[in-house]
C-alpha cells in the first residue's frame, strides 16, 4: 500500500480507520523513541520549546547536549534548560546508550539548534561522541534525522554539507521562523519552527497557526 503522507512513520503506524479520505493520512502515531540533541548554536529556546511540546507520557524522550550547548544555554536561557519530568538526559561521552548502536536506534533524532560544526561532522561520518554516533546510526538505519541548522550567512562548505545530508536522507528544517502567523512574542516565532519539527516527527500539534486555516 502506498501511503500518501510520507511524514508518517512506516514502521510504527497504526491505522485508525483503515482507509484514506482524499489525501489525509488518518493514522495514529504510536509510541516513539526520540533523541533530542542540543548543540552550541544560537537558539536554545528552540530546544526548550521542543522539549516542552513532546509528551513523555506518549513517547520515550532522550536528550543529549554538546559541550558548547551548555555555554549557549547559559547565555540565552536565564533560568537554564528545563527538562520535563520523565525526559532522560545523557552525558556526551558514554557510548553505553541504546542509540549508540544500530541494534537499538531511536525512531527519530532531532538536532536542535544545530551548529555548522555538528552538521559538518554528521555529514562526514564523525562519530567520536554519542551525539555524533547516534546521528550516524539514525542515518545508516534509515530512521528520521531532523536537523535544525542556524547560521548566517552560509558558506559553500555549509551548503555542500546540507547537500550531503539531504542525499543521505536527513531532513533540514532551518531555524527560520515564519511571520505570517501573527506572532506576538519570541516564543510564538520560535514555535513556528518547532511546529514544523513536530509535523515532521508525525506528532499532531497546534503550536502555530497554519496557512489559510481558520483561527479557533
Ligand atoms: C553564544 C554563541 C552562539 C553561537 N551561535 C552559533 C550559531 O548560531 N551557529 C553555529 O554554527 N555556531 C554557533 N556558535 C559557535 C559554536 O558554539 C562552536 O562552533 C562550537 O564549537 C560548536 O560545537 P558543537 O557543534 O559541538 O555544539 C555559537 C557560540 C556561542 C558561544
Image (tube, rainbow, N blue to C red):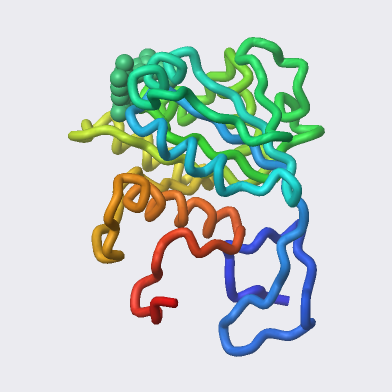
Please give the name of the residue rendered at 75% of the width and 32% of the height, measured from the top-left corner. Answer: 102
Q: Is residue 181 left or right of residue 124?
A: left
Please give the name of the residue rendered at 73% of the width and 47% of the height, measured from the top-left corner. Answer: 59
Q: Is residue 104 left or right of residue 3?
A: right
Please give the name of the residue rendered at 30% of the width and 45% of the height, measured from the top-left corner. Answer: 186
> Among all residues in the image, which is located at the extreme front?
79
Give residue 72's quadrant in the image. top left
Compared to residue 86, the image places residue 117 above or below, namely above
Quarter the N terminus occupies: bottom right
Of the pair 91 and 107, the residue shown nearer to us: 91
Residue 110: image x %, image y %? 54, 39
Compared to residue 121, the image places residue 102 above or below, namely below
Please give the name of the residue rendered at 32% of the width and 51% of the height, measured from the top-left corner. Answer: 189
Q: Is residue 80 left or right of residue 115?
A: right
Give residue 131's quadrant in the image. top right
Compared to residue 212, the image places residue 8 above or below, namely above
Q: Is residue 55 left or right of residue 40?
A: right
Residue 99: image x %, image y %? 72, 29
Quarter the C terminus occupies: bottom left
Of the pair 76 and 173, the residue shown nearer to us: 76
Residue 144: image x %, image y %? 60, 47
Give residue 78's quadrant in the image. top left
Residue 133: image x %, image y %? 62, 23
Amino acid at each position: 500500500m502506498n501511503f500518501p503522507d510520507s511524514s508518517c512513520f512506516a514502521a510504527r503506524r497504526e491505522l485508525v480507520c483503515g482507509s484514506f479520505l482524499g489525501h489525509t493520512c488518518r493514522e495514529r502515531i504510536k509510541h516513539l523513541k526520540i533523541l533530542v540533541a542540543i548543540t552550541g548554536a544560537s537558539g536554545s529556546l528552540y530546544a526548550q520549546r521542543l522539549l516542552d511540546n513532546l509528551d513523555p507520557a506518549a513517547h520515550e524522550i532522550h536528550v543529549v547536549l554538546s559541550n558548547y550547548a551548555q555555554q549557549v544555554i547559559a547565555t540565552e536561557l536565564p533560568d537554564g534548560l528545563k527538562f520535563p519530568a520523565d525526559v532522560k538526559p545523557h552525558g556526551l561521552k558514554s557510548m553505553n546508550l541504546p542509540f549508540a548502536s544500530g541494534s537499538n536506534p531511536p525512531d527519530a533524532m532531532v538536532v536542535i539548534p544545530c551548529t555548522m560544526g555538528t552538521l559538518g561532522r554528521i555529514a562526514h561520518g564523525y562519530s567520536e561522541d554519542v551525539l555524533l554516533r547516534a546521528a550516524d546510526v539514525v542515518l545508516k538505519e534509515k530512521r528520521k534525522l531532523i536537523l535544525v541548522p542556524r547560521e548566517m550567512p552560509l558558506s559553500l562548505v555549509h551548503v555542500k554539507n546540507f547537500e550531503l545530508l539531504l542525499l543521505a536522507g536527513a531532513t533540514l528544517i532551518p531555524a527560520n521562523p515564519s511571520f505570517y502567523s501573527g506572532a506576538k512574542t519570541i516564543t510564538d516565532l520560535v514555535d513556528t519552527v518547532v511546529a514544523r519539527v513536530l509535523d515532521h516527527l508525525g506528532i499532531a500539534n497546534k503550536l502555530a497557526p497554519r496557512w489559510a486555516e481558520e483561527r479557533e
